[in-house]
Amino acid sequence: MADESPPRVLEREIEVVSPTGFCFGVKRAIESLEKRVEECVETADGVKVYSLGMPIHNPQEVQRLTRKGLKVVDRIEDIPPGSYVFVRAHGAPPSLKENLVARCGAANVTDATCPFVKNAQDKAAFLSGEGYEVLVLGDPGHPEVQAIVGCAGCEVMVASSLDEVEALNARDKLGVICQTTQKVEFLAAATAILVPRTRELRVFNTICGATTQRQEAVRDITSRIDGLIVVGGRNSANTTKLVEIARGNQCDVLWIEHAGELSTEWLADKTRLGIAAGASTPDWLIEEVKHAIETSQEPRGMEGL
Ligand code: F3S
């Protein structure tokens, strides 16, 4: 006979990792973007502000901003001359910023480059100016890395793995900087490889504090939970690192972008849960996920597991 009893809400301990979610740089960028959107008058096609590329790597938050009048485009040619335009927290190469100013006017360009990213850009320019060959440790396809490379004003090497660092030849003067979201272990191991093969090595640790704190908090929680839910965009570099760290600690991880991706099967046998989020994940998404877990019911046939 079919079980007609109502499904039970499973009691769980849920710990939201602290700190988690929006970092200083993303919060600052979103605030300036929203302010700009509020100030601007809508064009005939309903657009107030253009962003070249995703303003942050979180599709749900970008959707929310799009409803307020943001339009994301992939090419500068898609921005009508004289429009309001937004430079995201990841920054942009100087040549691109110059083109935006020429097309839209300096007063119409809001530059929300995160100060920590700006620091990495300045260090790249400094090293190049001092005659160092420049190596960036990071993902060559990531806009932040592309902006740092553009700021160096010289040919720049980019390595995203220790194998790529190993493959580099001996150098006379080498300067190293890091994408702000990299793991400190990567920087340390890369430096250890480079020391014996470089006559003069200068390393700037440009990993940002927000990244390190979020990574340490994830490392810390993994020993006391049955599973970790990581909320963040699939294209978010810092979210990817949180997932890697938790899995490296043998923690069962569910990576989702929003509450609709929660899996009752994955939740079924877990009574102590952690929730972590990337630096571009808004609080409202984290809250939605927490609420969905708190009200989730045991799937039929799993009661008592
Ligand atoms: Fe800036 Fe660090 Fe956030 S570089 S954008 S504060 S992750």
Image (cartoon, rainbow, N blue to C red):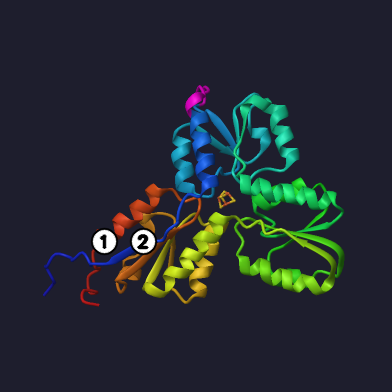
Spot occupied by residue 287 in the image (x, y as percentages of width and height): 34, 52
Which region of the structure is painted magenta? 38-45
- What mark, if any, has residue 72 been given in the picture? none
The x and y percentages for residue 211 are 55, 57
Foreground: 131 or 29?
131
Magenta stretch encompasses residue 40: yes
Q: Amino acid at mark 1?
A: Ser
Residue at the image position 73 percent from the left and 73 percent from the top: 192
Q: Main secondary structure of the magenta part?
A: loop
In depth, the one of 199 and 152 nearer the eye is: 199
* Residues at circles 1 and 2 in contact by the CB criterion of under 8 Å: yes
Dot 1 alpha-carbon crowd within 10 angstroms: few under 14, some 14 to 19, many 20 or more: some
Q: Amino acid at mark 2?
A: Leu
Q: Residue 146, position in %: x, y?
A: 70, 50
> Per the image, is 111 magenta?
no
Q: Of callouts 1 and 2, which one flags the residue occurring earlier in the amino acid sequence?
A: 2
How dense is the environment of label 2, judged by Cα within 10 Å: few (below 14), some, or many (20 and up)?
A: some
Residue 296 numbered tag? 1
Relative to 74, residue 223 above or below: below
Instruction: Quickly name the residue at label 2.
Output: 262
* Whether residue 136 is visible: yes
CA gap, disc 1 to disc 2? 10 Å
